[in-house]
Image: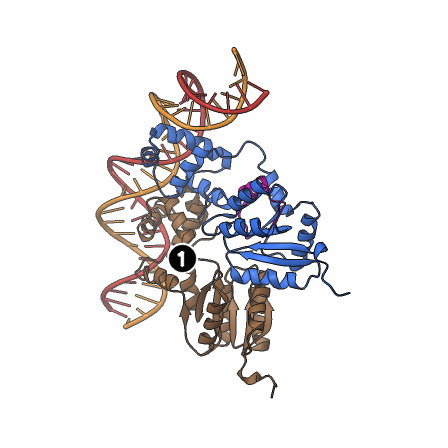
Chain colours: A blue, B brown, C orange, D red
Amino acid sequence: MNVPRRSESIRILTVDDHQLLREGIAAVLESQEDMTLVAQASNGHEAVDSFRRLRPDVTLMDLRMPDMSGIEAITAIRGEFPDARIIVLTTYAGDVQAAAALKAGASGYLLKNLVRKELLETIRAVHAGKRRVLPEIATGIAEHVADDALTRREIEVLQRVAAGKSNKLIAAELDISEGTVKTHMKSILPKLDASDRTHAVMIALRRGILDI
Amino acid sequence: MNVPRRSESIRILTVDDHQLLREGIAAVLESQEDMTLVAQASNGHEAVDSFRRLRPDVTLMDLRMPDMSGIEAITAIRGEFPDARIIVLTTYAGDVQAAAALKAGASGYLLKNLVRKELLETIRAVHAGKRRVLPEIATGIAEHVADDALTRREIEVLQRVAAGKSNKLIAAELDISEGTVKTHMKSILPKLDASDRTHAVMIALRRGILDI
DNA sequence: ACGGACATCTCCCGAAAGGGGCAGGTCGCG
DNA sequence: CGCGACCTGCCCCTTTCGGGAGATGTCCGT
């Protein structure tokens, strides 16, 4: 009568480098009859290993972790298991990060300031094959659907701008002419809707294009 | 025999806008016989209210929260209750934020990626009247003990620089001459050891002088 | 094979930023 | 009172940026 209905229980893996937060998730899941926490991981590598061994139904994954980022872990897991259901659970990371996570195969995107009810609902929804992305995140992504994505080279340039390097120095590092660096900057500023290089760096940080 | 020894139990208040993390802390504290979680708050105002009502022995406080920041809450609480024992528990916020928290009266400074053992030890240490600041934070503060603190005006200028404003525009906003803004910049750059305004903004973000 | 995206490069030019030095006024603290 | 910190302002000068317009080559996908 009281035998656990294992076949109907959602098997869950949590991935986050904050042990305290994992304990919080564990506490929340413990109270749910239809959910079982099968493992915890503290970085991307552990996440991939655990996933291979246990094949959880739903994985809760943070993005910024040591060793291997969440995006890389999602890519690796979905590469091996295309049906893997992964929910990103992170502090705000910007629309570009969110878009990258969804492109890598995440089925959900939540922020850590959520309440337990939202977490539980999203787990059940994603397990049922649905997608759940926070409205504000979806809006943020939608606002930049145009062609305003920076190219690889532009990001390389912008990273060095953020480090306080002049166009001349950046040109030397990338082994291109200073004029080319300026051309890249002239492409970056309108894309980010920035008034100058400092503004561009701030916007890139907010949108998750650059890390602090 | 089994009566709870209330007088010896450390009464704890947690303050964080992340419910999940609070649940994690609650789960960790629950397993400890000598600790009692007496209340939770999700912003600075609630924290001050709860503290007034309950006078917890130890308060765990995040810094960045909506409505009222942790620093403000610490200042308010320590203003009324100079013996309040407060431990800051935050994601990395930079040495300036940490220094401000300690100056406001915090007895401890921890990062959220800590493990339960460290949390419990720190709570007991702080309750016993000791101070506990993470070595890396203490080092970060010590590195900038000199006179490299930005003045109020310099921070006002730097905030506007981060918003992508030109010296001329900043001058207009602050109702001073452009030359004065340049003078401030000439003071800011060497203080932060920055090569240009963009670099200065990045360093200020990392050190907790500016918010994203 | 052709277009499109990307990266590269060039020229010109005005505006902005950064570096140096100097100096007045105010305010608070010893 | 006097000193130092702070905010304010100015000079000169060089370097850097940002905007505009154009051009070449490569590589990818249709």
Question: Relative to residue A56, is residue C2 drawn left or right?
Answer: left
Residue closest to the eye, C8 or A51: A51
Name the spot of residue A176 as percent of width and height, x first.
34, 29
Residue closest to the eye, B22 or A75: A75
Magenta range:
A91-110
In the rendered picture of this protein, how many numbered marks are placed on residues? 1
Q: What amino acid type should be assigned to the residue bearing mark 1?
A: Arg
Q: Residues within 10 Å of mark 1 (few under 14, many from 20)?
A: few
Quarter of the image where the N terminus of chain B is located: bottom right
Q: Would you identify the image quadrant in which residue B22 lies?
A: bottom right
The residue depicted at 56 percent of the width and 43 percent of the height is: A101
Residue topped by disc 1: B152
Picture layout, residue A39 above or below residue B180: below
Question: Relative to residue A11, is residue A176 drawn left or right?
Answer: left
The answer to whether residue B107 shows anywhere in this view is: yes
Secondary structure category for the residue under label 1: helix
Picture layout, residue A59 above or below residue D28: below
Name the spot of residue A132 as percent of width and height, x first.
66, 47
Q: Chain of mark 1?
A: B
Q: Is residue A156 magenta?
A: no
Residue closest to the eye, C20 or C8: C8
